[in-house]
Image (cartoon, grey):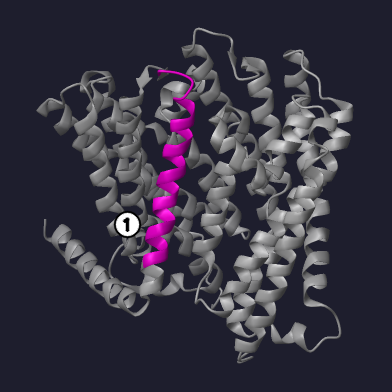
């Protein structure tokens, strides 16, 4: 319960304060320019996008369990999983899913309480078709973030501490996922590279679908790409796990 | 004066002890350094993206923003060196009862708990941050008069005090609460408001950042003083304000300690 409270405090403040900071920042940018649009975004669309992208990044963020694995590897607590007749990856995935389901419900209530009055006042509306199309991408974003965190945690087989890697991952996701700006405002060559990286599925793609900036059919070709990334990361995680187990001394526990 | 010297000598001993510990974990040194450099890079990257589309943000030109970022990096590095790792350890002291040992020592726990561990890798980041700030100043088209620089150093010191007492306040709160990590998350999230120039915020928000949660005093105000956007006459009142808030926080910390019940007792 204590950890859940921590998570809910962190997530809800991350959502409200994170969105507020970047909304103020973009608002200041629009105050300074003498043309109404940046790329395809006018002021209202940009602020709406930032709110939705922050929500997406909070919904897809990593949870406690996958981070804890590093400590369990170091302390030898991993032993308790190894002697049990189930898949370790399956256990971690189902544990994390359980944590996420309760977290999602709370976050969506917070988003609704703060978001709907703002949407109403600003005369904005969420695209229903877009939300339906965003859900599979959000789930993929969640799996991607889970796998990034898991892979880093498994590095504890080799490193004394991996929290610095986790922070670096969080910083890269903050910048490259589209949480603080839409990828379409980047210069064209960087956009091209970003399209082939897995990060944009965590915030940019679901947020542009929710806000109606992109039609679901435009993003349909990206679905096999995100599934390819998930497959690749899954294979990598499995390979690291196998290599790590060969190194693991199983001391302590 | 004797007390100040005693505390400085004690901090010197903490530093020496941390240096010896750090020598044993060199990979930690490199990784922590890289992690902070990456934080600097993404902050810079965000503003570089924004300045692709505008020439100024809330009155800050690109050159002004580099000076702001340099100041932010320096203040962040000072926090990382002195307080941050101690603040993250504090709830653990409460949870495990280790706080008892700090209470037994003949120095004030507000000093020994919040300054015990010096984050050595962040000293390298501090040097980098100072280098970046000097670079930002050198490429800025306007001159930086001596009085601006002296006022900047004064407000940088004031900002460091703000960083200290805000974390001390949240550390004291954690004595009352069981879900202590939550308090750290609250502080971490709120403190992000200080990572941007305060002039981007709505007036009411801005006032809060100068008074209730004086996060603007950490990086935004020193940077604006250096740039000549604020003068001492504009913000002299923040000096007594910080003194009062520091005094209140120390009293609150003492009050919290009186309500601390050791887990070992």
- Which residue does the image show at 25% across and 24% down from the upper left? B227
**Residue where numbered disc 1 is placed:** B82
Q: Left or right of A54: which side holds B198?
A: left
* Residue A70 image point, x, y percent: 61, 73
- In the displayed orientation, state which residue is furthest to the top: A34
Please identify the quarter of the rendering in which residue A253 is found.
bottom right
- Which residue does the image show at 50% across and 7% down from the upper left? A34
- Which residue does the image show at 22% across and 68% down from the upper left? B10
* Residue B14 image point, x, y percent: 27, 70
Quarter of the figure that contains the C terminus of chain B: bottom right
* Disc 1 element: helix
Q: Main secondary structure of the magenta part?
A: helix
Q: Residues within 10 Å of mark 1 (few under 14, many from 20)?
A: many
Quarter of the figure that contains the N terminus of chain B: bottom left
Task: Note whether residue B119 is visible.
Answer: no
Q: Is A250 located above or below residue B55 in the figure?
A: below
Please identify the quarter of the rendering in which residue B107 is found.
bottom left
Please identify the quarter of the rendering in which residue A204 is found.
top right
Q: Left or right of B255: which side holds A197?
A: right
What segment carries the magenta color? B30-55
Task: Note whether residue B40 is visible.
Answer: yes
- Which residue does the image show at 72% across and 48% down from the upper left? A60
B6 in the magenta segment: no
B49 in the magenta segment: yes
Q: Chain of mark 1?
A: B
**Residue B206 vs residue B45, the one in the foreground:** B45
* Residue A182 image point, x, y percent: 62, 31
Q: Is A209 located above or below residue A162 in the figure?
A: above
Q: Is A246 located above or below residue A136 in the figure?
A: below
Q: Is A243 located above or below residue A148 in the figure?
A: below
């Amino acid at each position: 319960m204590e950890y859940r409270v921590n998570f809910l405090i962190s997530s809800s403040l991350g959502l409200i304060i994170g969105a507020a900071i970047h909304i103020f920042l973009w608002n200041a940018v629009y105050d300074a320019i003498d043309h109404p649009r940046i790329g395809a975004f006018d002021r209202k669309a940009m602020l709406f996008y930032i709110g939705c992208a922050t929500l997406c990044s909070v919904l897809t963020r990593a949870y406690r369990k996958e981070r804890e694995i590093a400590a369990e590897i170091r302390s030898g607590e991993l032993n308790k999983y190894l002697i049990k007749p189930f898949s370790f990856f399956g256990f971690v995935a189902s544990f994390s899913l359980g944590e996420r389901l309760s977290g999602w419900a709370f976050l969506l209530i917070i988003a609704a309480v703060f978001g709907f009055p703002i949407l109403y006042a600003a005369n904005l509306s969420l695209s229903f078709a877009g939300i339906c199309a965003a859900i599979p991408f959000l789930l993929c974003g969640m799996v991607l973030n889970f796998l990034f965190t898991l892979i880093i945690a498994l590095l504890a087989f080799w490193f004394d501490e991996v929290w610095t890697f986790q922070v670096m991952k969080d910083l890269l996701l903050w910048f490259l996922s589209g949480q603080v700006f839409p990828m379409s405002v980047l210069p064209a060559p960087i956009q091209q590279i970003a399209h082939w990286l897995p990060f944009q599925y965590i915030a940019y793609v679901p947020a542009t679908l929710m806000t109606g900036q992109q039609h679901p059919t435009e993003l349909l070709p990206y679905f096999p790409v995100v599934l390819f990334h998930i497959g690749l990361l899954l294979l990598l995680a499995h390979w690291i796990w196998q290599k790590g187990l060969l190194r693991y001394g199983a001391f302590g526990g | 004066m004797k007390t100040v010297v005693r505390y400085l000598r004690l901090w010197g001993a903490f530093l020496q002890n941390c240096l010896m510990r750090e020598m044993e974990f060199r990979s930690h040194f490199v990784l922590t350094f890289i992690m902070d450099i990456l934080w600097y890079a993404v902050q810079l990257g965000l503003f570089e993206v924004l300045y692709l589309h505008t020439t100024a943000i809330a009155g800050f030109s690109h050159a002004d923003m580099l000076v702001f970022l340099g100041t932010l990096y320096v203040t962040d590095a000072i926090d990382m060196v002195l307080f941050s790792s101690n603040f993250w350890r504090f709830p653990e002291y409460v949870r495990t009862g280790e706080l008892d040992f700090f209470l037994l020592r003949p120095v004030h726990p507000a000093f020994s708990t919040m300054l015990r561990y010096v984050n050595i890798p962040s000293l390298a980041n501090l040097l980098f941050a100072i280098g970046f700030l000097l670079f930002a100043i050198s490429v800025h088209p306007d001159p930086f008069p001596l009085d601006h620089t002296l006022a900047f150093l004064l407000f940088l010191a004031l900002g460091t005090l703000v960083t200290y007492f805000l974390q001390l306040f949240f550390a004291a709160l954690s004595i009352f609460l069981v879900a202590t990590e939550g308090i750290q998350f609250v502080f971490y999230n709120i403190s992000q408001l200080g990572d941007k120039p305060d002039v981007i915020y709505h007036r009411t928000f801005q006032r809060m950042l100068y008074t209730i949660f004086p996060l603007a005093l950490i990086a935004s105000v020193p940077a604006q003083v250096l740039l000549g956007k604020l003068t001492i006459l504009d913000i002299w009142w923040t000096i007594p304000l910080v003194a009062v808030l520091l005094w209140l926080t120390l009293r609150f910390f003492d009050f919290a300690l009186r309500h601390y019940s050791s887990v070992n007792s």
